[in-house]
Image (cartoon, helix red, strand yellow):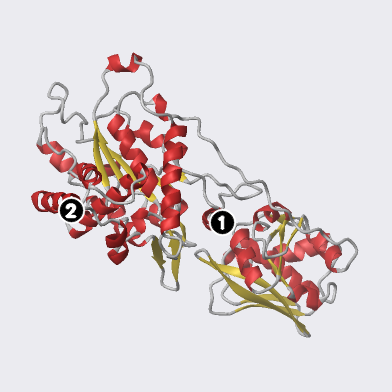
């Protein structure tokens, strides 16, 4: 008799079904595990044997063979413990085989039989729903997985609870979704003195998900402005929250209970490796650009990042997804994020201040900003200079609008864009528009067209830069509540497109 249980193997955010087959046959006592398991999966036999022993279940003196099918698919992670134990219990006729076959399970076993939470419960629940199976997982992972309403989710605290559930002694209740949390940032734009132009650029970037580059002397407020960006972004919609949480679930970043409606704000240090930013490593884990999906990736000290890391951002910025290539697999992660970069104008930071600048001015500015390639710089929709704030201005009362007031305008503009792209599957905001769609929604009036053509010729805009100006102009019009893109909208968009300073 061959007993079967089902689980999943992760390929990016996709969960592929894995059939766990168990055969108990006469022969020399042995416990074999085949099907391309990694080290963690291979060690499952010792954890399963000890966990069963703690329940006073002795394995027979026969040959036990566990096969993980498909055999050519790499199996990684400790979540295979529970399905292996279930297949073995079904083969020993301790639990009903048909009940086990109707379940998709995952979980790590402790030596005393308790179930330890594992990563990936949310995408596993999605896969179980597609196969019309119940998901069985550790109790601590149940609240996360239960957000997939199409699947029934059962959370168990131990393997003994699972046995009592399947034998009808003590059925386990379905897991309930955890509470939705929205972390409200206490940082307000009113805390930033001056910098009205930078605040305006921040609002435009938030409204249309445009990439923003800020260049300024040390202490001018670049990081302070970026830290207040989450406070003006609208909460994640239900589909966005589920999509983002699936990535965070694979990275093990979800708190018990699961879903968070606050948009991600990731700020990696400039010493981060390429695998940390783009994704990769032993298990091809998601990188910072995927963890920032539907949110913000803030890269402070932008030129200090390794050149190879910066150049890898070019394709994900354009496509909204990244493919982590390995010898045996290609793993795809979504990464539709807003890139906010901050940089000093030169190595010493005081390019525009002769009294404090180093002796290499102006060459140090060209060398420092030259670390950012032209193709990458061309992908920033808005590029602004953040001038230093006079210390006398720090005693002035707050100026401008609060984060709540800006957030209300951003939310209104995004609602307009959501309605505009409601019938277009892959378009969500103005930053996604291209081709005929961009020409349709951002076609400026006659004066606006003349202005953008003149500016394109004067400043040598590339085709990409030309289209990005149109997208920003469309967002500015949305913030104003205008149906058409007019000359003032184009003029403001072009002003944010001018090159950042590289010389005094």
| Residue 228, above or below 395 | below
- Residue 298 at least partly seen: no
What kind of element bears circle 2? helix
Select label 1 or label 2 by which is in front.
2
User: Which residue is at a point 41% across and 64% down the rendered structure image?
Assistant: 324
Q: Position of residue 77 (x, y in %)?
A: 59, 63
Q: Position of residue 40 (x, y in %)?
A: 60, 63
- The residue beneath circle 1 is 242
Query: Which mark is first along the chain, 2 or 1?
Result: 1
To which quarter of the image does residue 489 belong? top left
Q: Residue furthest right?
A: 169
What kind of element bears circle 1? helix
Using the numbered discs, state the Cα–Cα distance from disc 1 to disc 2 in whole angstroms: 43 Å
| Residue 141, above or below 327 | above
User: Which residue is at a point 29% across and 66% down the rendered structure image?
Assistant: 436
- Could you classify mark 2 by the number of other residues whose Cα lies within 10 Å: few (under 14), some (14-19), or many (20 or more)? few
Q: Position of residue 482 (x, y in %)?
A: 33, 47
Q: Position of residue 303 (x, y in %)?
A: 26, 43
Left of 20 or right of it: where is 198?
left
User: Which residue is at a point 63% across and 62% down the rendered structure image?
Assistant: 78
To which quarter of the image does residue 197 belong? top left
- The residue beneath circle 2 is 446
Q: Quadrant of the C terminus?
A: top left
Towards the viewer: 370 or 34? 370
Left of 177 or right of it: where is 235?
left
Left of 307 or right of it: where is 64?
right
Towards the viewer: 154 or 53? 154
């Amino acid at each position: 008799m061959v007993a079967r249980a089902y689980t999943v193997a992760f390929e990016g955010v996709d969960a592929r079904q894995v059939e766990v087959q168990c055969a108990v046959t006469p022969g020399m006592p042995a416990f074999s595990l085949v099907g391309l398991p990694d080290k963690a999966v291979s060690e499952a036999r010792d954890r399963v044997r000890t966990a069963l022993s703690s329940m006073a279940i002795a394995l027979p003196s026969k040959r036990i063979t566990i096969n993980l099918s498909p055999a050519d698919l790499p199996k990684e992670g400790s979540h295979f413990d529970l399905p292996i134990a279930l297949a073995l219990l079904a083969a020993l006729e301790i639990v009903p085989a048909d009940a086990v076959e109707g379940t998709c399970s995952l979980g790590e076993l402790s030596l005393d039989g308790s179930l330890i939470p594992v990563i990936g419960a949310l995408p596993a629940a999605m896969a179980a729903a597609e196969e019309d199976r119940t998901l069985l997982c550790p109790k601590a992972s149940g609240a996360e997985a239960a957000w997939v309403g199409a699947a029934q989710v059962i959370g168990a605290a131990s393997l003994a609870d699972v046995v009592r559930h399947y034998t009808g002694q003590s059925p386990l209740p379905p897991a309930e979704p955890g509470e939705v949390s929205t972390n409200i940032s206490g940082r307000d734009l009113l805390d930033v003195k001056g910098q009205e132009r930078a605040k305006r650029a921040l609002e435009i970037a938030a409204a249309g998900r445009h990439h923003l580059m800020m260049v300024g002397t040390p202490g001018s407020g670049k990081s302070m402005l970026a830290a207040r960006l989450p406070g003006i972004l609208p909460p994640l919609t239900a589909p966005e929250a589920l999509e983002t949480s699936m990535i965070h679930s694979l990275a093990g970043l979800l708190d018990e209970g699961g879903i968070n409606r606050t948009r991600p704000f990731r700020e990696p240090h400039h010493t981060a490796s390429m695998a940390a930013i783009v994704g990769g490593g032993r298990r091809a884990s998601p990188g910072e650009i995927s963890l920032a999906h539907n949110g913000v990736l803030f890269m402070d000290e932008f030129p200090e990042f390794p050149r190879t890391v910066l150049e890898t951002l070019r394709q994900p910025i354009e496509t909204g997804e990244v493919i982590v290539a390995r010898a045996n697999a290609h793993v795809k992660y979504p990464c539709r994020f807003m890139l906010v970069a901050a940089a000093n104008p030169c190595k010493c930071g005081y390019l525009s201040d002769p009294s404090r600048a180093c002796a290499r001015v102006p060459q140090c500015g060209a060398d420092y900003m030259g670390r950012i390639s032209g193709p990458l710089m061309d992908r920033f929709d808005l590029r602004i200079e953040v001038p230093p704030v006079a210390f006398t201005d720090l005693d002035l009362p707050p100026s401008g609008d609060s984060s709540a007031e800006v957030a209300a305008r951003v939310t209104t503009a995004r609602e307009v864009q959501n309605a505009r792209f409601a019938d277009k599957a892959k378009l969500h905001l103005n930053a996604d528009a291209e081709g005929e769609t961009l020409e349709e929604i951002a076609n400026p009036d006659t004066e606006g067209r003349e202005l953008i053509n003149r500016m394109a010729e004067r400043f040598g805009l590339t085709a990409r830069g030309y289209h990005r100006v149109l997208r920003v102009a469309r967002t500015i019009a949305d913030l104003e509540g205008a149906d058409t893109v007019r000359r003032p909208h184009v003029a403001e968009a072009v002003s944010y497109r001018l090159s950042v300073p590289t010389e005094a």
